[in-house]
Amino acid sequence: MSSWLKRQINTLEQYTVDVIFGRREDIRATLYAAFLQALSLLFNGIAQARLWLYRQRILHDQPLGCLVVVVGNLTVGGTGKTPVVEKFARALRDRGRKVAILSRGYKSKAPPMWKKWWYWLSHTSEPPPRIVSDGQRVLLDSEKAGDEPYMLARNLPGVIVLVDKNRVKAGAYAVKKFGCDTLVLDDGFQYLPLKGRLNLLLVDKTNPFGNGHLLPRGILREPIKHLKRASYVFLTKSNGQRDSELEDLIHRHNPGVDIIECAHRPQYLQHFGSDERHPLEFLRGKNVGAFSGIAVPESFEKFLSDLGGHMLFKRRFLDHYRFTYDDFVAIFSEALEKKAEFIVTTEKDAVRLPDGLPCPVPIYYLRLEIDIIRGAADFDEAVGRICFPETARRPA
C-alpha cells in the first residue's frame, strides 16, 4: 500500500471517529452520520442473527476439554482490557494453572493473501498459530504479534501467548503442544465458536457505551442488552465514586451480576532503550511533550497532568498506528523547539517504536497496572471458580 493511500485511509478513519464522537457539526458530517446510521442498522441485524444461530444450535461452539475464560467488551477500544487480562492470567498462573492467552493479534502482520489462497487451493493445512511466547521466551516483535499480545508476553513469564484469528485452532494447539488447562480469550466476547465458562465483560466507566449506536455510527459491537451474557462486569477507569445510574442499567439487563470496580494506576516511568526507571515523582514540574496512538488518549494525558507534568505539546494518532520516520522527525523537532526535557508515551505505543531509534530528546513510557478498588472478593472468587471449580462457592 502506497504512503499516499495510507494517509487517505488514516484521514477517513480520523474523520469517522470525529463524527462518532460529535466533534464535527457541519452539513457534510450530518450526511455522513446518516449514512453510518444506515450501516449500523445492517450491522445490528447481522450481530443479532449470528447470536441467534448459536443459541439455536444451528451453529455450534467447539469445546476443547479445558477451562475457557473470556475477557472482552461491548465496545471497540479504550476499556483498558490488556491490564485486566494480564492481572487475571497472572492470578491463574500463580495458583498453579497452565495458562495460554489467545489473541487475534489486531493489526499484527498476518501471512500474505497469496499464501492463504495457496492453502485453500492445495488443500494444505494452515500453519499453526503464531507463538508470541512459549512461556520462557518472547519470540515475536510487536509488528508480527500485535501490540497487546507482545505486551502480555513480555510481562507474563510462564504464560503462553498465541495469535491466530481462528482461536479454536489456537486453543487446541495450546492444549496439545503446551499442555495448557486454562485458556484466556483476549477480546473474545464476540468470538462465539469457543464458549467460555466465565465471561468477564469490561465497561469503561468514563464512556460506557459511547453515543449508544452500534458500529459504524457508534462504538458498540453489540446492543447494550447483551450485558446479560456477562458472568462478571468490570467497571474500568474508575475514580472511586459510585455511579448508581450505570450500575442500575447493568443490573436491569443482568440482575444480580457481580460488579468489580477497578482503576488504572500509574506505576513508574520507564526509559525507552535502556533499563533506566524513575518513580512517578520524576515527572513533577518537568516540561514534557506527549504522543500516543490509543483509542482514548485523554485518559493518558490526564495522568501526566495529574502527576505534575507541564505539557508543552501533545500529538495524537489513531489506535494501533504504525509510526513513520516523518512522525518522529516532527515529534523531536517540536520537542527541541519548545525545550521539552523529555517525551512521554504509553507502554502500548512504546512497543511500536523501532529498536535503535535515535532520540535527541529522551522518551519514557508510563507503566499502568490494574488496582481493584471494589469487588476484590468477587475477583478472587472468579479466580477460585476456575482453579478449584469443585470447591468454589459463593458466600451465603
Image (cartoon, rainbow, N blue to C red):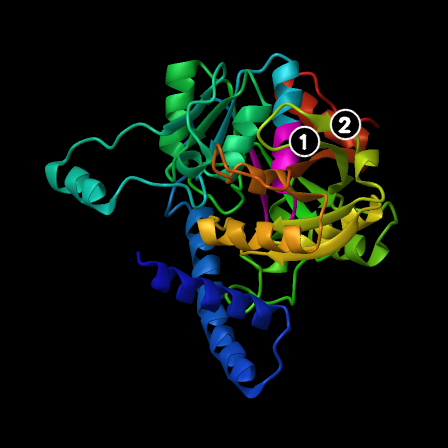
User: What residue sits right under mark 2 in the picture?
Assistant: 394
Q: Position of residue 83 (x, y in %)?
A: 65, 35
Residue 289 or residue 61, whichever sits in front: 289
Amino acid type shown at disc 2: Arg
User: For residue 176, what is the image quadrant?
Assistant: top left
User: For residue 359, what is the image quadrant?
Assistant: top right
Residue 326 or residue 290, whichever sits in front: 326
Read off the magenta span: 68-87
Is 40 above or below relative to 3?
below
Decide if residue 277 is in sight here. yes
Q: Position of residue 199 (x, y in %)?
A: 60, 38
User: What residue sits right under mark 1 in the picture?
Assistant: 270
Q: Is residue 119 left or right of residue 250?
A: left
| Residue in view at x 87 percent, y 50 percent | 242
Q: Is residue 336 left or right of residue 318?
A: right
Q: Is residue 344 left or right of residue 308?
A: left
Q: Secondary structure at mark 1?
A: strand
Mark 2 surroundings: few (<14), some (14-19) or many (≥20) residues within 10 A: few
| Residue in view at x 74 percent, y 30 percent | 379
Residue 97 in the magenta stretch? The answer is no
Decide if residue 74 is in sight here. no
Amino acid type shown at disc 1: Gln
